[in-house]
Amino acid sequence: MAIRSFLWHIIIILKVHQVQIVTTVNLQHRLRVQVQPLSENSVPEEGAQNQRPNRIGNDPPRRFESNLFNFQPRRPDVSGDDDVMPGVLSNPFNFRPKMPKDPTKVYGLNPFFAQASGQNFNRPTTQRPQVKTSIPPQRRPEENNNLPGTRQTQIGVMPKINADTIPFEDTCGRAVTINQLVFHGGTVQKGAYPWLAALFWANSSAVSYTVSYKCSATLISQLHVVTAAHCVKRKNRGYDETLDAKDLLVKLGKLNIQEWTYSPGEKIIAPKSITVHPDYISSHSDADIAVLELIERIEFTTTIRPICLWSGPTNLEVVVGKLGTVVGWGMDENGNITTSEPRQVSLPVVSHEDCLSSSAIFATQVTGRTFCAGFRNGSGPCNGDSGSAFALQQNGRWMLRGIVSISVSEHATRHCDLSNYVIFTDASKYVDWLLSFFK
């Protein structure tokens, strides 16, 4: 899977007579600046055994002399503004991959979260009757599903579902097909990750209407998707501003983001509003999370279902060493800016200590509300995968643990440097905030 992004704010380190010079470059999606295309020099080394770009191998990353962050790869700002943020950021990190009706009707509280955690957030929970379905003999039930009040879900089949009768706890985090997980990127089957959404920026004028892929997002309810905050921000005359909801589109249930013809089980919908976490600032990875409220309720189907919010302990130690899955349309090993269909990769969570000791560049970006993951072998999310979910399985359900936030960039190619770890927003630290949208 190649997961990479478009508007990159990149810090380039040049050595002139052994003196490091830091310079800032903004790559515009329209490529009006005199820079090399992002696809150049991004093919893996000959003989590499993975499908990820750049930095192949298990050697530890080079150490930086100073505390420099290359602000994660961003997709270009397609706002039409030609302003480039002046100066060098105080935290010189290559910031994040970023390519350039009624809330009361939402299921009040994620019942699965309530059952698993036993916490009371003083929010009403909609009680829905259990629905029994006849199971054909040839279908094999999912294994080890011991959650109370839920029914067994078939895997490998796509039965017809009446979304109006499905209890929320029977849909969140459940896929109707399964994929064989891979370490270095692989294709995705339809229905394997039904919470996967693609976020597009729509630009209309008197003579044209263009739509550009921007980021990934994740469905968390009938009315809400969550993504990275930097995915819904842009620079305007040197200042950060949130994109207008009317300029965005969300694709659900569709794998090929280059196809715009309608097929059953797919949905293209506009957001009604965008809410960025109040703690978010563009020069940092902390609180890099935003919620988009959709203009109407989404009906759950076999290909459109929400992921479960995290439940249980939120301390990082309980998930260190566990493999999570990231799915997205980002840059592939051949240098393609985006892939037409998503690819998946599995990555291990690492401790803060391991992340910080791997390179000094992480010192100003790793916080108590972020975590690092990766093999540092050339596999992982990259340019174009901002906003993608880092999903972990618990008790047979997929749960949202993280959101792709930032990565170090390769100074020569301006692509993500996957010989370093990738930083994720720790979504478990924002569950209360996410639940506040379900009131």
Image: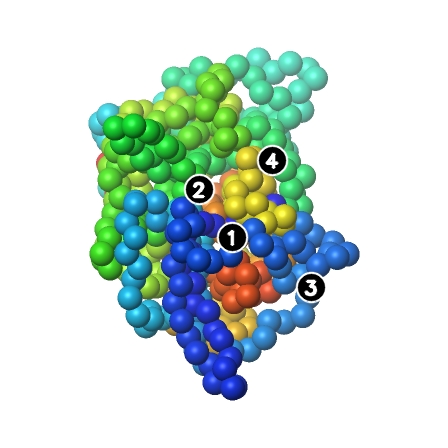
**Amino acid type at mark 3:** Gly
Residue holding disc 2: 216
Closer to the camera in the image, 137 or 271: 271
Question: In screen coordinates, is 52 left or right of 382?
Answer: right
Looking at the rendered structure, the number of numbered marks drawn on it comes to 4
**Which of the 4 quarters of the picture holds residue 41?**
bottom right
Closer to the camera in the image, 46 or 144: 46
Residue neighbourhood size for the residue with mark 2, other residues' Cα within 10 Å, grouped as few (<14), some (14–19), many (≥20): many
- In the displayed structure, 19 sits above or below 110; it is below
Rounded to the nearest angstrom, the CA distance separating label 1 from label 4 is 27 Å
- In the displayed structure, 361 sits above or below 36; it is below
Q: Which residue occupies 39% across, 22% down?
A: 299
**Amino acid type at mark 2:** Ser
Residue holding disc 4: 188
**Which of the 4 quarters of the picture holds residue 34?**
bottom left
> Quick one: label 2 or label 3, which is nearer the N terminus?
3
**Amino acid type at mark 4:** Val
**Amino acid type at mark 1:** Pro
Instruction: Locate residue 437, reporting x and y percent.
Output: 26, 39
Rounded to the nearest angstrom, the CA distance separating label 2 from label 3 is 27 Å
**Which of the 4 quarters of the picture holds residue 306?**
top left
Q: Foreground mark, 1 or 4? A: 1
Residue holding disc 1: 37
> Quick one: label 1 or label 2, which is nearer the N terminus?
1
Closer to the camera in the image, 84 or 329: 84
Residue neighbourhood size for the residue with mark 4, other residues' Cα within 10 Å, grouped as few (<14), some (14–19), many (≥20): many
Rounded to the nearest angstrom, the CA distance separating label 4 from label 2 is 15 Å
Residue holding disc 3: 57
Q: Which residue occupies 50% across, 31% down?
A: 258
Q: Which residue occupies 29% across, 28% down?
A: 207
Q: Secondary structure at mark 1?
A: loop
